[in-house]
Each structure stands twice: as C-alpha cells, then as structure tokens.
C-alpha cells in the first residue's frame, strides 16, 4: 500500500502539501491536480480514521450525495434517513460536491469499520477503490456486476415523455440535457426519448451539452433563441431534469413565448421544495421514497451477508402539470 511520502515524491511536493489537499485546504490548482493524479496512480488511501478502529458494527450508514442543495437529493436523503432509523441505523451524510477525495474518505471509513455500509449517488472515478467486501448500494449508476444498484426506469420515462408531447399535439420536439462524462442511468432518458421518436417517425432534435454549468447555460440559451424564438422550429421540449425544465420555461417566458400555448415542456424527477409543496410542471415522477426504501433494504441485507438483486428498476409515472396542455 502506498504511503503519503510516496505520493509526495510522485507529485513533487512536500508531505504537508499532500496533507493539505487531502484535508481540503486550499493550494494552487496546479499543485492540487498533481497531488490528485499521484493519489490516483498510486491508489493511495488516506488513513485518516486509523485511531479508534472498531471491529464490531457501528449501526451507521454513510450516504454520499453530489449535493444536498437540490430538492431531489434532499427528499431522497430524508426518506433514506427515515428508513434507516426505522431499522435502528444512523446516517452520516456526505455532501461530496463531486469530489472523489471526499468520497474516497468515506470508502476508507467503511474499510476500517467506522461505518457498516454505504449508499451512494456518485459520478466520480471511484470504482477501482471499491472492494467487494464493502456493503454498498449505488443509486442511478451501474459500476460492475458485483455492486448492486437501484434506479428508476429512465428509459421508459424518456419514452413516456416523448409520447406525452406527441399526445398533446407537438409536431417537432427536442431533448435538452447536460451530459455526464461518467456512465449513469440518467442517460437512458435520452435513449428512451429518441427510441419513441424514431419508432413513431417523430421529428426531433437533441441538445446535450457537456460543458460546465456556465457554458451549458450560455449554449442552451443560444440554442433556444435560434430554434424556438427565431425559427419556431420546436414546439415541445423534454428536459432531462425538472431543474432544466424550469430554466427553459423561465427563459422562454422572458423572450415572450407562452408556455404551454406556444411551447410545451416536460421535465423529469417530480421534485418539490417541501413536503407541503405541489409539483408545478408536467414531469416524469421518480418514486423517490421507494428508491430510498429499496436502497436501505439492500445495504442492510448486504451487511447481514444476504443476497440482493443486482439491479432494481422502479417504474415512473407522468404528472400532468401546467407546462403542457391537458
């Protein structure tokens, strides 16, 4: 196993600098990049939880999410914590912000028996760090044949969105997405949408940008201005998430387009800002509570050395909101 000294030598920095990167203390971007590359190449695992190692169960599960600053992830975390509590487990929440070093630290905790298992939504490159001995359930991402995952039926959801736009009279439709560099189940939303359009000879376009957030926003507005505002070439849009659907709605209204009279829009997720909130847009709703329940049941079964299904695919449903014609 590599040591911190070996990482420092590979990166050409001091041990103290490596320690700063591991502990998220600011260093020069170029230095951070060199240290992270050395960690990946050497497969170094920070032993930051070495003290107080436990061999017995902690009855604690780590939940790794990209962010809690999002209604979907917040609602999912709420239900996961509730089902864990019902099973006498505690939850540690990791707001990773896509940082693989943060996620790696939680994997290390599991290896050192600081937590009994992990439930994760991650798009980071951590697959090579996940040993088969860690009870881990992945949500919305296939890693390999050994790691079970729980997902909504994204393909059917994409097809359902295309069908709804077809049913409400849209003549030329479009998919709007922000592509991930990592393979994940949400890509199937686009595949289902395209599959329906091609089977039913539906005229469609694809906007699937992989730039950063600022570039995505800029490119999306340019696309909408050209294809919707100026050419009126699109009258139905399926956005890969509700967030993007709201962005599309806001921009088109600012530009004088009427929703749903001129352009009909459908999202994906079924998010609400609170328990008492109502879903406002037409959307494909994910069974968030069921995802949580199945994920908790799966990780507890793994902890107890029981077999679990490698793939759990849950059905979605359409919610008719105010952004398509009823």
Image: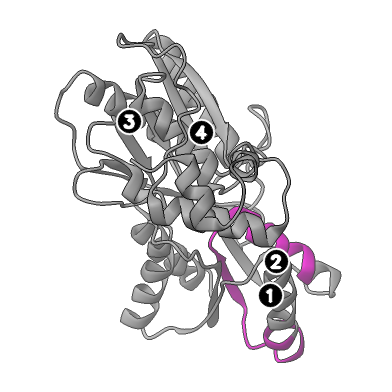
Q: Residue at x 30, y 51 (%)?
A: 143
Please say if the residues under marks 2 and 1 sit with CB atoms less than 8 Å apart. yes
**Mark 4 → mark 3, Cα distance in angstroms:** 12 Å
In the image, 309 versus 174, the foreground residue is 309
Circle 1 Cα neighbour tier, 10 Å, few/some/many (<14 / 14–19 / ≥20): many
Circle 2 Cα neighbour tier, 10 Å, few/some/many (<14 / 14–19 / ≥20): many
Please say if the residues under marks 4 and 1 sit with CB atoms less than 8 Å apart. no
Mark 4 falls on what kind of element? helix
Q: Nearer the viewer, mark 2 or mark 1?
A: 1
**Mark 3 → mark 2, Cα distance in angstroms:** 33 Å
* Left or right position of 314 against 274: left
Q: Which residue is mark 3?
A: 294
Quadrant that contains the N terminus = top left
Q: Which mark sits nearer the N-terminus, 3 or 1?
A: 1
Q: Which residue is mark 1?
A: 220
Q: Residue 269: percent from the left, percent from the top?
A: 52, 48
Q: How many labels sit on residues?
A: 4
Q: Which mark sits nearer the N-terminus, 4 or 1?
A: 4
* Left or right position of 111 against 215: left
Q: Residue 6: percent from the left, percent from the top?
A: 45, 47
Q: Which residues are magenta?
A: 226-252
Q: Which residue is mark 2?
A: 248
Q: Residue at x 72, y 69 (%)?
A: 217
Q: Which mark sits nearer the N-terminus, 4 or 3?
A: 4
Q: Which mark sits nearer the N-terminus, 2 or 1?
A: 1
Mark 1 falls on what kind of element? helix
Q: Residue 18: percent from the left, percent from the top?
A: 59, 44
In the image, 51 versus 319, the foreground residue is 51
Q: Which mark sits nearer the N-terminus, 3 or 2?
A: 2
């Amino acid at each position: 196993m590599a040591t911190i000294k070996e990482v420092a030598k590979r990166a050409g920095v001091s041990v103290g600098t490596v320690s700063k990167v591991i502990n998220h203390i600011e260093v020069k971007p170029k230095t951070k990049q060199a240290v992270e590359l050395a960690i990946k190449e050497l497969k170094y695992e920070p032993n930051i939880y070495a003290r107080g190692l436990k061999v017995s169960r902690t009855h604690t599960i780590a939940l790794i999410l990209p962010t809690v600053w999002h209604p979907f992830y917040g609602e999912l975390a709420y239900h996961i914590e509730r089902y864990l509590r019902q099973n006498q487990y505690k939850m540690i929440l990791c707001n990773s912000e896509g940082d693989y070093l943060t996620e790696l630290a939680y994997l290390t905790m599991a290896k050192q028996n600081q937590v009994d298992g992990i439930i994760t939504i991650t798009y980071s490159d951590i697959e090579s760090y996940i040993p088969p001995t860690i009870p881990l359930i992945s949500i919305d991402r296939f890693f390999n044949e050994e790691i079970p995952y729980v997902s909504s039926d994204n393909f059917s959801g994409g097809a359902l969105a295309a069908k709804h736009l077809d049913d409400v009279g849209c003549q030329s439709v479009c998919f709007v997405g922000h592509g991930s560099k990592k393979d994940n189940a949400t890509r199937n939303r686009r595949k289902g949408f395209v599959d329906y359009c091609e089977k039913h000879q539906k005229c469609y376009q694809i906007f699937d940008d992989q730039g950063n957030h600022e570039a995505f926003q800029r490119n999306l507005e340019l696309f909408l201005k050209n294809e919707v505002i100026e050419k009126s070439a699109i009258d139905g849009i399926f956005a890969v998430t509700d967030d993007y659907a709201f962005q599309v709605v806001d921009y088109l209204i600012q530009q004088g387009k009427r929703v749903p009279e001129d352009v009909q829009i459908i999202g994906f997720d079924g998010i609400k800002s609170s328990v008492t909130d109502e879903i406002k847009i037409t959307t494909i709703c994910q069974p968030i509570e069921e995802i949580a329940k199945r994920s908790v049941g799966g990780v507890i079964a793994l902890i107890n050395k029981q077999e679990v299904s490698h793939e759990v695919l849950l059905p979605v449903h359409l919610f008719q909101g105010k952004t398509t014609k009823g």
